[in-house]
């Protein structure tokens, strides 16, 4: 018995000594090199293959096998390659042969690769399958074929089957629309956030979507740690104070679209640092809503809000959206009405006066509010038409907005110390009327050889009429203004993909804004202001899920004319962005930006306006733009599914910044 046991142990030891294990990890490795590596590590193996036939295929496989056949099959993956064993020899042969090679890339509307998409080449005459390939983890494919002028058929679970006529061997980037079939909802407890080097993806819960009124309200309920949604005006900014641009399906979203959005259609929300997609118009921080896509249909959404604690305030809006195939139409109309009796302020101001022939002295003006009345009516109407196809996207929006403030009145008392003027009651009466017509468009093209082009034109015309009257027992100040403004802007962004992860961006922009202001009343005057600008940028970016970096530099030409005074300036600007994400729960982002802060146009008018008995205002047409340097370091951590933190540190430097200067006026009797 002991001899039998010893014999079994010896045989087992012999088998284990002669058994081989295969453990490899390949990342976009050419298939011939992967097989060659296996042969070098196991010189006793007899593997036969033709190098040239397999060089069109890459493999990204984790191999863990204890026999040769399984190791080779795991290495080959989904590539159309066979493995046949004859005696002790393994034959590896490509199923496809051809003197031509068709190349391309499959992506979805979210610009993400369609991994493992099946790509078939069909004969144009009868749609016979000539050959096929499987897209890799980057969505790329290479298919040898002897035929020209074939049809590529792309299919994948979750995406609509897409056909493309192949007139060249470089098919380029093909966008596969997501399948419009909406499946029954399944509740799964899982991660609601995924962090990458250049973007963070957040998945709203069903409760968050059901309880949100609109897009901004959904952002507030999702509590994305990198952004803050202000309660006062619903504006969105990063925790370190940067402005956030908001997009819906990669198109710049208007306030009307954000209000009309049906939150149940939101699939995910992306927050990006210096994103690579040219449709984001070069914005540095972006929030993008990804929506459920439909083939046809639509909805109408009605919102009504009423506030009454500080006065009556009503907001009623209707948003209607209709989609048919590639076209989408939406119409928005709103009526905002405010009737507030609690708006105004009281305050005390001190002035250092120096009348001629007298010693300088401090004067105090105390203004006390006793009652107020503010009435405001706003009616915006917009119409939008969008077109979305495989290689072209377009969105055109026209809008009209009327804002009327028939009453913005304050009553109270005003006192002076020393008694330069008699203490008395005061009344301020203001009214205004603004009419504005706008147009903005978005055009996005995709071309072969990884080229993308986006265009953004904008134009507006505004008519602004304002009247202001301040009266006391001794003083009357009348300031009226009629402003006509027109504005035009256009930008173009070209992106070229260089391999899998490298991109080159070229951007150009230009525009002008002209103001014509006629002042009447106690201080009649005329202002003519013109701002014109143009520039361009060059940007290089490297983007992977775990590491990303981009460097941007550009020049901007600024032309400012205030009446007869002209100021011209050419200055550089640029930014550096670096992101690192070791896994889906941690990310670190560094941003360094240099630019110039532009001077507001209302600070350049040389005309004098009187505010009250002791204070006048006058602009300075020679004001120049201020240098600005900002840098920030942001860290994000998904500690738990319900707890996410995002600490940051930021520095902002403003150099040679404009500031108010107080000086004597009216022979020293005012400031």
Image (cartoon, grey):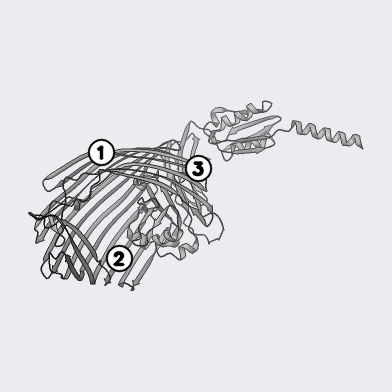
Compared with 513, 14 (above or below) is above
Indicate which disc, 1 or 3, sits on the residue closer to the N terminus.
3
Locate residue 452, reporting x and y percent. 36, 42
Q: Which residue was labeled with disc 2?
A: 333
Q: Which residue was labeled with disc 1?
A: 571
Residue at the right extreme? 1
Indicate which disc, 2 or 3, sits on the residue closer to the N terminus.
3
Q: Tell me the distance, in whole angstroms, between the alpha carbons under discs 2 and 1.
A: 42 Å
Residue 651 makes an appearance in the image: yes
SS at badge 3: strand
Locate residue 195, reporting x and y percent. 49, 48
Locate residue 185, reporting x and y percent. 53, 61
Q: Which of labels 2 and 3 is toward the front?
A: 2
Q: Nearer the viewer, residue 257 or 81?
A: 257
Locate residue 217, reporting x and y percent. 40, 62
Q: Who's the residue at 22% across and 44% down the image?
A: 533
Q: Which residue was labeled with disc 3?
A: 120
Q: Mark 2: give few (<14), some (14-19) or many (20+) Cα within 10 Å.
A: many
Compared with 1, 387 (above or below) is below
> Which quarter of the image is occupied by the C terminus?
bottom left
């Amino acid at each position: 018995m002991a001899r039998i046991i010893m014999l079994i142990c010896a045989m087992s030891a012999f088998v284990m000594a002669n058994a081989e294990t295969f453990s490899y990890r390949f990342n976009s490795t050419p298939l011939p090199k992967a097989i060659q590596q296996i042969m070098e590590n196991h010189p006793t193996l007899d593997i036969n293959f033709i190098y040239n036939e397999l060089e069109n295929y890459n493999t990204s496989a984790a191999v863990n096998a204890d026999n040769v056949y399984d190791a080779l099959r795991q290495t080959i993956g989904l590539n159309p390659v066979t493995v046949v064993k004859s005696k002790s020899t393994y034959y590896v042969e490509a199923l496809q042969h051809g003197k031509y090679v068709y190349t391309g890339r499959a992506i979805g509307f979210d610009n993400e690769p369609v991994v493992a998409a099946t790509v078939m080449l069909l004969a144009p005459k009868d749609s016979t399958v000539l050959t096929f390939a499987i897209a890799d983890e980057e969505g790329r494919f290479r298919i040898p074929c002897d035929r020209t002028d074939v049809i590529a058929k792309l299919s994948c679970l979750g995406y609509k089957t897409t056909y493309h006529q192949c007139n060249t061997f470089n098919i380029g980037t093909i966008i596969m629309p997501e399948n419009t079939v909406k499946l029954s909802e399944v509740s799964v407890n899982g991660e609601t956030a995924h962090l990458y080097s250049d973007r963070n993806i957040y998945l709203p819960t069903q409760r968050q979507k059901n309880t949100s009124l609109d897009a901004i309200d959904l952002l507030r309920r999702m509590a994305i740690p990198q952004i803050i949604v202000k309660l006062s005006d619903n504006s969105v900014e990063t925790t370190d104070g940067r402005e956030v641009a908001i997009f819906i399906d990669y198109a710049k979203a208007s306030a009307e679209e954000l209000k009309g959005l049906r939150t149940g259609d939101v699939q995910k929300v992306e927050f990006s640092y210096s994103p690579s997609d040219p449709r984001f118009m070069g914005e540095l921080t972006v929030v993008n809503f990804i929506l459920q896509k439909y083939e046809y249909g639509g909805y109408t959404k009605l919102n009504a809000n009423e506030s009454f604690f500080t006065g009556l305030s009503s907001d009623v809006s209707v948003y209607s959206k209709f989609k048919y195939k590639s076209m989408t139409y939406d119409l928005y109309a709103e009526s905002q009405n405010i009737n507030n009796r609690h708006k105004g302020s009281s305050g005390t101001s001190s002035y250092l006066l120096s009348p001629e022939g007298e010693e300088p002295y401090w004067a105090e003006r105390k203004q006390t509010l006793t009652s107020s009345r503010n009435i405001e009516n706003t009616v915006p109407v917009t119409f939008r038409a969008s077109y979305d196809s495989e290689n072209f996207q377009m969105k055109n929006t026209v809008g009209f907005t009327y804002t009327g403030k028939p009453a913005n009145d304050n009553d109270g008392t005003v006192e002076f110390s020393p008694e330069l003027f008699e203490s008395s009651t005061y009344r301020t009466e203001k009214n205004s009327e603004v009419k504005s017509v706008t147009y903005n468009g978005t055009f996005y093209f995709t071309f072969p050889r990884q080229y993308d082009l986006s265009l953004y034109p904008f134009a507006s015309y505004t008519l602004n009429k304002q009247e202001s009257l301040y009266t006391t027992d001794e003083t009357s100040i009348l300031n009226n203004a009629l402003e006509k403004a027109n504005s035009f802007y256009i930008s173009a962004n070209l992106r070229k993909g260089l391999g899998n992860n490298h991109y080159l961006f070229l951007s150009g922009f230009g525009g002008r804004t002209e103001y014509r202001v006629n002042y009447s009343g106690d201080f009649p005057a005329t202002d003519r202001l013109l701002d014109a600008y143009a520039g361009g940028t060059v940007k290089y970016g490297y983007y992977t899920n775990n590491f990303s970096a981009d460097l941007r530099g550009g020049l901007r030409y600024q032309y400012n004319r205030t009446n007869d005074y002209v100021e011209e300036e050419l200055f550089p600007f640029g930014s550096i962005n670096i992101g690192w994400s070791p896994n889906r729960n941690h990310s670190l982002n560094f941003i360094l930006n240099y630019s110039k802060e532009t001077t507001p146009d209302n600070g350049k008018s040389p005309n004098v306006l009187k505010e009250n008995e002791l204070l006048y205002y006058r602009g300075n047409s020679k004001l120049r733009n201020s240098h600005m340097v900002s840098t920030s370091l942001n860290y994000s951590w998904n500690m738990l599914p319900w707890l996410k933190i995002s600490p940051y540190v930021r520095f902002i430097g403003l150099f040679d910044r404009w500031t108010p200067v107080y000086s004597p006026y009216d022979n020293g009797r005012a400031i």
